[in-house]
Image: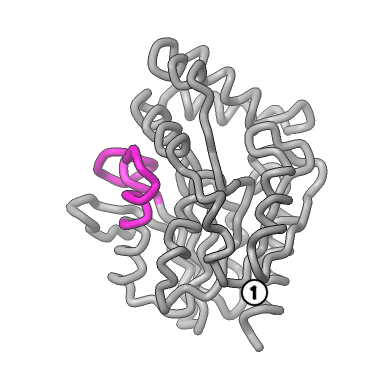
Amino acid sequence: MPYLTIGGDDIHYIAHEQDAEFSLLGIHGAGQDCRTWPASLGQLEGCNCYLLDLPGHGESGGSPREDITEYARVVTGFVQQKQLQRVVLMGHCMGGAIAQQIALDQPQWLQALILVSTGCRLRSAPDYLDLLRDDYPKAVEQTIAMMYGSQAPRHLVEQARERWLALPQEVLYRDMTACDGFDLTNRLSDIPHPTLILSGDIDHMTPLKYAQFMEDRLPGSRLAVIAPSGHMLPLEQPGDMVRLVREFIASHLRQ
């Protein structure tokens, strides 16, 4: 398994390299890892694909952060060490917040954004944060209820429950704390990059109105709604998601 050392942490990633002009870099959400993403993303033609485990997640070393900007520095460090050019940042939930944070700096290597099941403001209810700290098993059940709807395949729900119960409590708590401090509501118009926004129609964690708000304020953005799907869109509807990513890359980046 490949690793890069970034800021003293060994960061694990999955790579599908084609010596292509474009690179797609996937950033997972809170309490998750690179298994969030459909494996078929690695089959995109003419596009390198990299899927990261953030610090303290999956196979990566280090500790989870409590601030989106700290995670953004890790992702930027990865791009710089790999010397990637013309990068499409693809982020799910917290990963979408990280992608937006990076986009504000407008690095020369950033080509476009794909924002999946996310928003420009990701508040966590105080009672939920308290539950994560004080009664983790109960918090896991509440998290699953928000992330998966009744339409989600049962095997996905059970896999999520097993992974989160095995996850160190600190990871999800710190991630949700980082999300709670994220708010770019008044800065969205400063992000000029072409952006594909993907949302499930029955997302209880980051409802569709979050995606519609971003589409209204992000120049050059387009919203696609996938149904039926909850918050875990990449796992619930991988075929539709990969199709839309492929079309976005083909229409916006290969001109």
Q: Is residue 28 magenta?
A: no
- For disc 1, the marked residue is 249
Q: Residues within 10 Å of mark 1 (few under 14, many from 20)?
A: many
- Range of magenta residues: 53-73
Q: Nearer the viewer, residue 120 or 97?
A: 120
Dominant secondary structure of the residues highlighted in magenta in the image: loop
Is-magenta flag for residue 68? yes
Counting from the top left corner in percent of width and height, residue 248 is at 69, 71
**Residue in the picture at 50% in, 45% down:** 183
- For the C terminus, the quadrant is bottom right
Residue type at numbered disc 1: Ile
Please report the residue visible at 57 percent of the width from the left and 25 percent of the height from the top. 143
243 or 198: nearer the eye?
Answer: 198
The spot of residue 253 in percent (x, y) is 62, 80
In the rendered view, tell whether residue 110 sits above or below residue 243: below
Query: Residue 38, how many percent across, how many down?
Result: 60, 53
Image x and y of residue 3, in percent: 29, 58
